Image: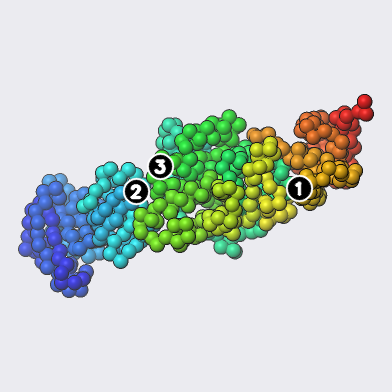
Amino acid sequence: MTDEIRAVLYSDVPPSAEQESRFKQFLKNKYEQEVPFEWIEDTSIKEGFQLRVGAEVYDWSRGGVFRQFVDAFAARKYRGRDTIPLLKEALEDWELAALPEEVGTVLTVGDGIAEIDGLENAAYGEILIFESGVRGMVQSLKEDTVGCIIFDADNDISAGTSVKRSGKTASMPVGDAFLGRVVDSLGVPIDGLGPIEAADYNPIERPAPGIIDRQPVNQPLNTGLLVIDSMFPIGRGQRELIIGDRQTGKTAIALDAIINQKDKNCICIYVAIGQKTGSVVQLTETLRKHGALDYSVVVAANASDSDPLQYIAPYAGCALAEYFMEQGKDVLIIYDDLSKHAVAYRAISLLLEHPPGREAYPGDIFYLHSRLLERSARLSEEKGGGSITALPIVETQDGDVSAYIPTNIISITDGQIYLEENLFFSGQRPAVNVGLSVSRVGGDAQTKAVKKATGSLRLDLAQYREMEVFTKFSSDLDDATKNQLEYGMGLMRMLRQPQYKPYSQHQQVVMLVSAIAHCMQGIPAADINKFTAELNTSFEDVHGEICSEIDETGQLSDENKDAIIEFATKLAEKYKPTEE
């Protein structure tokens, strides 16, 4: 405390000589030196005093932080009186009960950012409260000022507005009541269905689980998409990136994965970042139509929302997911998409005058996403055994996976599903590029039945893609090459799957076993999907016990495999063209 800082006492009546002496003694004990103070009349302060020392405020007024003490003192000593004087008995407890309330002043405000002077002890991530009731969060700590992002409209904030510290970090309301609802980044419902009663509050920023608290990722989380579950399996607790250009089916894969979790004891959270409101409404209706909204939560920070709300949206969704994970439940969370999230953070950082780096992104852009995605895990049995599986989505430009943000997130995640524009517009949907996609968990996240049925599918497709390129320059092909091309084309046709039509495990096994055994060889490519549809339906009718065994045990015996091949071979004769 320097000699330049003085104390100011506010109240509606001047302090008595004894009270003035007590104030001086309080200041001397608190700051270990003599602190001069002056009294200023303030008729808005009733039944007490408010002492300001620099940026710190000690509020002993009726409506201040000291109110509980005053009320308790009044009930004990002055019951029935109109006023409660601060007499000697009360003053003796001041030093024990007084808590400083640090107050700052807004210097500049605009674009959801406020620069504040006076909050010397503010912490990063702390919630600040402006005098109009608007909330903000400390995002930048400078030598003399504090940078704050504002969560609500800043119309009532201007230069000179006072700001108080809350002493609390940003939190997200959580609870089972959020299932089936659409909320914003602050947990406020925006679906018009009324308020949501929160069971608790989780901090939006939290350290990721440690190594001791995790267990291996070896339980499958099926998406219902044949091309993914067979070659790029996703396990519970994994982080699998969905990457591709715009309008290539990234969100469609996420939606199919959510719809496929029905009746599988898995909570789904969809975080929409920077999307049009109409798109979020359409997505919500799609989930409701397929009965998936009952076990899902939509966290929406739309394109019309401010950058601060878009910035905290994925962290808020993750805080909600952690609530369910800590109850021992499995959670699937979609971040759609982190490209827009990075753009929002870049805008905030530039407004806060953080030094720009590559592509004007701040230097901590990698940490922005790593601290988010590392919170996905499968907890140990001692911690309840719950899991968070993350499917972040990233948009590329002209298929450039070597751009700054895509490469950052690729290095954080456990694999990526790359969607190719050329495949999409050629009718191959999902448009998954088998060569560039990968799952680093691999077969550990597959059941033995799917693993055995898949066989050499990925290698066969790679050979087909390579052979397809070279045969474009040749007109004369031998029979072996023609058969290989026909086989590969049949595999590609089989992997085409209508949207919102996920396959069960036994359906995937039946299709894969039939394809790898060349049962589809000779069927025209245009009839492959008709064949697989009839194959699944007919096989379930004839061999329902085999389907149930595959679904319940996750095993595929040699006898069942032979039964599938025999059945598919007979059915294929119906689709093969005759010599006539």
Query: Which residue is label 3 attached to?
Result: 305
Q: Quadrant of the N terminus?
A: bottom left
Q: Which is nearer the N-term, disc 2 or disc 3?
A: 2
Amino acid type of disc 1?
A: Val
Query: Which residue is label 1 attached to?
Result: 469
> Toward which corner of the image does residue 346 lie, by quadrant?
bottom left
> In the figure, is residue 47 to the left or right of 130?
left
Q: Secondary structure at mark 3?
A: loop
Q: In the image, residue 130 lies at what x, y percent?
A: 28, 49
> In the figure, is residue 235 to the left or right of 509?
left
CA–CA distance in space, label 1 to label 2: 52 Å
Outermost residue, right side: 579
Q: Which is nearer the N-term, disc 1 or disc 2?
A: 2
Q: Nearer the viewer, residue 287 or 66?
A: 287
Query: Which residue is label 2 attached to?
Result: 112
Q: In the image, residue 357 lies at what x, y percent?
A: 45, 61
Q: Nearer the viewer, residue 176 or 105?
A: 105
Query: Which mark is nearer the camera, 1 or 2?
Result: 1
Q: Image point 32% across, 64% down: which residue?
A: 142
CA–CA distance in space, label 1 to label 3: 47 Å
Q: Secondary structure at mark 1?
A: helix
Q: Quadrant of the C terminus?
A: top right
> In the figure, is residue 384 to the left or right of 197?
right
Above or below, comparing residue 145 to residue 322 in the picture = below
Amino acid type of disc 3?
A: Asp
Q: Secondary structure at mark 2?
A: loop
